[in-house]
Amino acid sequence: MNVVIPKKIYLLVLTLLGLPILSRAQQVFNDSLETYINQPVSYEFKSEPPYKPELIKNFTQNGTLTLESLGNANYRVTYTPDRGFIGNDNIKIQYWKCPICLARIQLSVKVKPTIVNARQDFATTFANESVVLNVLDNDESTTGVLNLRSIPLVNNGRIQVLTNKKSIYFTP
C-alpha cells in the first residue's frame, strides 16, 4: 500500500518542523577579547553533553588555540598570540547550544602592545657612600614584566646593575 502525501502538506510539515530546527542550528554569537603582546587570553563557554565543541581549524592566523574541558560541559579556549604579534585575529568555535542546536562563537581578538609606566627614580647618599636603588619598584607594565636594560645617564659616579636585574648599585 502506497501512501501519497500531497506536496502542499509535505512542504507545510517541513516548514513547521524543519525551519525552526535549522534556524537554531545557524546561531552565531560574536564576542571580542583583548590581550597584550605575548600574553594568552581565555574565553569560557558551555557545550551541551555529550558533544565536545570543536575549534574550526586554520582560522586563526597569528596564534595558537587550545581547548580545555572544565567539567559539567564547560569549556575554555585559550588563544596565545604568535611571539611579537600585535594586531587583530579571529577564532571560530562550533559547539552544541542544545542537543539539536549547533551554534558557533566568533571571537575577535585584539593584541595590543605592552604599555610601560616607568617613573623617575632617585636616592640620597653621602660622599663616598654607595647606595642600592631598586629602580623597578615604582614602575608598572600591562604584562607584569619589567626588565632593566640600561642606565642612560649617570651623574657624578658609577653604576653597576645587580644580578637581580631590578636594582642598581650607585657609587658617587
Image: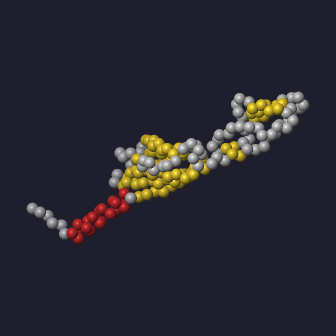
Q: Quadrant of the C terminus?
A: top right
Residue 54 in the figure: left or right of residue 90: left
Residue sitting at x 76%, y 44%: 119
Tell me where residue 76 appears, x and y as whole percent. 47, 45
Tell me where residue 113 appears, x and y as whole percent. 63, 48
Question: From this viewpoint, is residue 150 visible?
Answer: yes
Q: Nearer the viewer, residue 51 or 166?
A: 166
Q: Quadrant of residue 151?
A: top right
* Residue projecting furthest to the bottom: 8
Residue 131 in the figure: left or right of residue 107: right
Indicate whether 134 appears above or below 32. above
* Residue projecting furthest to the right: 127
Q: Nearer the viewer, residue 120 or 102?
A: 120
Q: Nearer the viewer, residue 170 or 21?
A: 170
Tell me where residue 127 appears, x and y as whole percent. 90, 31
Residue 40 in the figure: left or right of residue 75: right
Residue sitting at x 38%, y 51%: 96
Q: Nearer the viewer, residue 124 or 157?
A: 157
Residue sitting at x 73%, y 44%: 118
Q: Quadrant of residue 100?
A: bottom left
Indicate whether 143 appears above or below 110. above
Question: From this viewpoint, is residue 46 visible?
Answer: no
Tell me where residue 88 appears, x and y as whole percent. 55, 53
